[in-house]
Amino acid sequence: MTNNQNAQSLKPLYPDVLGQITGGPRINIDALEVAVGIYPKLAYLNQPMELVIVMQNMVDAEMQLKLAVRTPTEDPQGNVVIIETAKSQVGLTLSAGEVGVFRMPVIVRPPTQPTDSLPVRLAIRYRIGEGKRLRPPGGGAPPSVLSISPFKLQVLREIDFIAHKWNESADILTVNFGVAPKTLPAESDQLKPRYETLWSQEGLRQEIRLVRAQYEEALQIAHPGATGTLYPAMLEAVTDRFANRGMPLHPGEAMAIAKMMCYTVEDAPSREPDVVLENTRWFRSLCHVLAANPELIDTPRENILSQRVFEGIIYDALLMGFRIVENKTDEDMGDIAEQINYANRFMQWFSGHGEADLTYVYLPLVLGGLGIARLVRGGISENPWAIADQLTEAQHGRIDLLSSDNVVIFDMMDSLLDSYKRILRARRVKRPEEIAAEEAARQAELERKRQQQANGRVSAVPPNHEDDSTPPGYRRRNRFSGREL
């Protein structure tokens, strides 16, 4: 197929509009993701505020929603609180895949006293028919098309959306605001709730056209760069991302995961027979990123991949890792549906919805990374023994965290480590300390010779050699006359 045909066959992803607005905060309610905030967070009496709810339908089915708002009648000191809202309950309908923002006006009236914090509580319920998931959990590619102006988008981004822990109930969501000691003139305008669509299926055609237009540029970025340039950037990103998620990695673990991700991008499309570049999530995400941010084309390749396409790469690395581990260990890694389900659970955990689990580190990312470690070099200075030694040390450090599942995983790790080390020994690959010892011995020998020369124990003119200052043949005798020439 030609590049143009490949571009036309590219299937764009449903964009993560909510993440583009909030920059991170999101509340997962299964088929619905929401972000909740209030603006401004500190208001005067009689000043209108807005309870802002961004809603993202995750499936390809219509969703019927009911939103109920509850406000307090007294403050923490027992003083009377009067808060007006447009309505206490509202019904909405989201079409398949639709993303929108709902604004509920809120006004605090006298005799409410100044206070630092008053809660507004929100309950969200929905009904939905049969439908498949359109968006991956926990985030995804950015949108290149929105139904609102850049100005309105920027206003939404300035809202402080609440942080919601994954293990907290989403039945009742609470957002707090403060009341300042000042009263504005009361206005008689009627309070009206508003809903605005941010993204819908109508914009999908334009999204597809813009994403496919980036195919050639994305292809240039996808092609492997100079040996080892992606690995250091990916290693740094892996270390930071897992630490931010509450799972700091041992250096060996980070090395293996970074190698697995680099293999997924730079080697799998040519080495793995059934990997089609245009079908991978990371390449499709890359096209979306370039469509939404065309200025990135001048950004170094390794920065784009490690920072802007990280989630897409690690998702594909999970699925590729299962294949590598199964081939290397002959262990049953489940069918593709089970692997995709596991990858989705990982991505949900990685976005902040779930408890840290050592299994997510090792299976299949670290195990797969060890399996292909020899194929991904971190540069000419990297020693192949480094990852084996670091992972052995990591195992010793993790021993106290073992569960029954981890024991099985570490048994596979032992098998992969033994196989990896046998290959290095068979190829007579020297350890860093062996190379260092040889270099130290060489330097010591050179120093010994220099000292001998300095002490005069080595003749300036080697024996049986003429002085360089004497013309060649000058002291030879004429074989016929016996005279010196």
Image: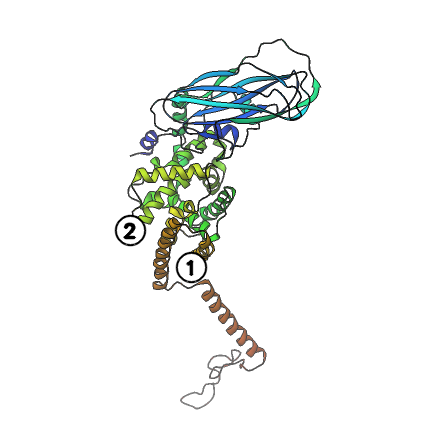
Position of 453 compared to 215: left or right?
Answer: right
User: Which percent across, then down, holds residue 392?
Assistant: 43, 58
Q: Is residue 138 above or below residue 400?
A: above
Residue extending furthest front?
78
Q: Residue at x 47, y 79 (%)?
A: 472
User: Which percent across, then down, holds residue 456?
Assistant: 57, 81
Q: Which numbered dot is residue 385?
A: 1
Q: Residue at x 55, y 75 (%)?
A: 450
Mark 2 highlights which residue? 330
Disc number lying in front (1 or 2): 2
Visible in this render: residue 425?
yes
Are the residues flagged by discs 1 and 2 in contact, CB closer than 8 Å?
A: no
Quarter of the image containing the N terminus? top left
Q: Residue at x 62, y 8 (%)?
A: 188
Q: How far apart are marks 1 and 2 (CA)?
A: 24 Å
How would you rate the neighbour count of disc 1 (Cα within 10 Å): few for under 14, some for 14-19, many for 20 or more? Answer: some
Residue type for callout 1: Trp
How would you rate the neighbour count of disc 2 (Cα within 10 Å): few for under 14, some for 14-19, many for 20 or more? Answer: few
Q: Which numbered dot is residue 152?
A: none
User: Which percent across, then down, holds residue 238?
Assistant: 47, 45
In this rendered view, identify the residue nearer to me: 159 or 7. 159
Query: Is label 1 in a helix, a strand or a loop?
Result: helix
Q: Quadrant of residue 185?
A: top right
Position of 164 compared to 218: left or right?
Answer: right
In this rendered view, identify the residue nearer to me: 95 or 275. 95
